[in-house]
Amino acid sequence: MELTFPKVETHEDIAEVAMLAAAIWGEYYVALIGQDQVDYMVEKYQSLPAITAQIGHQGYEYYLLRRGSETVGYMGVKQEDNQLFLSKLYIDKRHRGKGYANHANAFLEQLCVNRGLKRIWLTVNRENSSSIAVYEKKGFRKVREQVADIGNGYVMDDFVMEKDIPASAE
């Protein structure tokens, strides 16, 4: 069954993303950054009000990753000049390792080609070795390190990674 990428547009879609975010972050990131920081970041960046504001006022677009009627993950992007910021790409634990990240990457590359964008960039926690390996396999390269104060005594300690996009789809 083919993976599709419906755009998140309704209150129900946003609620689905927020619920999925809470589950994925709780399962995956506690080991990396601790429960308190996970709770803080989910509320600040991935809650229903936060996602609603990002879509409505901050220029973000969210897409669900669906296989048939089942949502297997989601992603959030923001177009900035001639590049695309991949803010979020999360796949539910039950669906990892099935090639969905490949399909998401191809979707994002085609989105860039369609919009004439030259690059995709993202940030990834420096301790998140499995995600870093996936991004490197997809052609992303580390370009710098970044520490961002996100409030409440927390920081995001990340690599910034980039991937150049050819002018036409292959």
Image: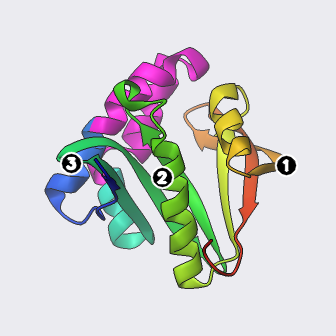
Q: Residues within 10 Å of mark 2 (few under 14, many from 20)?
A: some
- Disc 3 marks which amino acid? Gly
**Of labels 1 and 2, the one closer to you:** 2
Is label 3 in a helix, a strand or a loop? loop
Residue tagged 2: 103
Find residue 144 and name its label.
1
Amino acid at the residue labelled 1: Arg
Name the kind of residue labelled 2 in the image: His
Q: Distance between the residues labelled 3 and 1?
A: 38 Å
Q: Is 42 situated above or below 118?
A: above
Q: Which quadrant of the view contains residue 76? A: bottom left
Q: What stretch is highlighted in magenta?
A: 20-49
Say which mark, if any, is on residue 82: none
Q: In this view, does 4 lie to the left or right of 30?
A: left
Q: Which mark is residue 68?
A: 3
55 or 97, nearer to the observer: 97
Looking at the image, tell me whether mark 1 or mark 2 is earlier in sequence order: 2
Secondary structure under tag 2 reads helix
Residue 63 screen position, x and y as percent? 36, 58
Disc 1 and disc 2 in contact, CB within 8 angstroms? no
Q: Determine the residue positioned at 72% across, 39% down.
A: 158
Examine the rendered structure and indicate whether residue 75 appears above or below residue 100: below
- Asked if labels 3 and 2 touch by Cβ distance under 8 angstroms, the answer is no
Residue 119 position within the rendered picture, expressed as x and y whole percent measured from the top left: 70, 69
Q: If you read the primary sequence from the N terminus, does the residue marked by circle 3 or circle 1 appear first?
A: 3
In the depicted structure, whether residue 67 falls above or below residue 78: above
At numbered mark 1, what does the secondary structure look like: helix, strand or loop?
strand
Evaluate whether residue 148 shows in this view: no
